Image: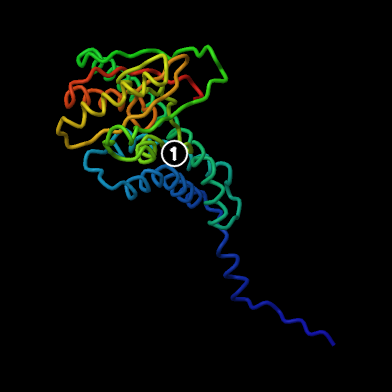
Amino acid sequence: MAIVLAEPVVTRRAQRAVLVDAPHMKFMIGMAAALCAVFFPRLVAALTTADHSHVTFVSREFFLLALIFSLLIAVAVMILEWRVPRAPRDTFMTTLGLPAMLAGALSASQGTAALQQAAETQEKLGQELSKVGGIAIEPAAKSGDKDAPHTQVALIDAIVTPVYAESPQAAQHLQSGSKLGIYVEEPRYFIVLDRAARREDAQARMSGLVTRISRTPSQRPVVLQLERNANEYLVTLAGGPRPRTAALLEALRLKDAYHLAPTLVEVPPGK
């Protein structure tokens, strides 16, 4: 014989009490969801930033705009779910979707605009540094031989005692950033100290530069290497190509510390 237990009256009342259909409650839930969607990314950014003494995460303009935006979302939720009995969590999660997408799109747009402005400022700064420091900047050369191998030759240890600095891998690690975010594809440049059409001549000139550099006391030693560029060999600073501003600063350091005449040579795209 099957025994059917009746559901307790208290449980049925508790389930009915969970459902919300009052318009003012819908408004409050929508307001809370919209505020969470707008302010939560800024809060996470503030908590994960090490030194934010000079960074403003929530300005007065943004705060007022966030309140107006949340009010509009809350009114829309109140109208759409007018007298519709639903659990508060369902209304909250449904409401959270739209403001979260809009807030994410707004943050991405603001981040892109700020990144473009920073890139333009960096470009102007690089041009001024180049003029003041007298550092020549050459565009990327068109290689006449597409099959020419990319050559990297270390210092000739048997002839001259090498002058070591930080490893090229460390320098390249500092230059490489995350490719998951929004970033600007900057042109990269070799810091060229000398050049020659033949590899043997370039090695001889590199050896002479090493001897000259080793006689100059400096806090940061230098490592040189050869790079094949089109139909010539370049005596460059080790570490590979660098972004324009970083290459200019390093070229100015070499010019001031060792009285050299470095030149920046742009690397062809995709190299």
Dividing the picture into quarters, in which one does residue 57 lie?
A: top left
Residue 229 screen position, x and y as percent: 44, 18
Residue at the right extreme, as displayed:
1
Along the viewing direction, whichever of 84 and 165 lies nearer the viewer: 165
Dividing the picture into quarters, in which one does residue 65 lie?
A: top left
Dividing the picture into quarters, in which one does residue 241 lie?
A: top left
Q: Is residue 16 left or right of residue 234?
A: right
Residue at the front extreme, as displayed:
158
Residue 108 screen position, x and y as percent: 45, 33
Which residue lies at the image location 28% right of the left edge and 15% below the top edge?
127
Which residue lies at the image location 20% right of the left edge and 14% below the top edge?
132
Secondary structure type for disc 1 = loop
Relative to 60, residue 25 above or below? below
Mark 1 highlights which residue? 178
Relative to 91, residue 218 above or below? above
Name the amino acid type tagged 1. Ser
**Dot 1 crowding, Cα within 10 Å, few <14, some 14–19, many 20+:** few
Along the viewing direction, whichever of 116 and 248 lies nearer the viewer: 248
Which residue lies at the image location 34% right of the left edge and 49% below the top edge?
48
Total marks shown come to 1
Residue 19 screen position, x and y as percent: 57, 60
Residue at the bottom extreme, as displayed:
1
Relative to 90, residue 14 above or below? below
Residue 262 screen position, x and y as percent: 27, 19
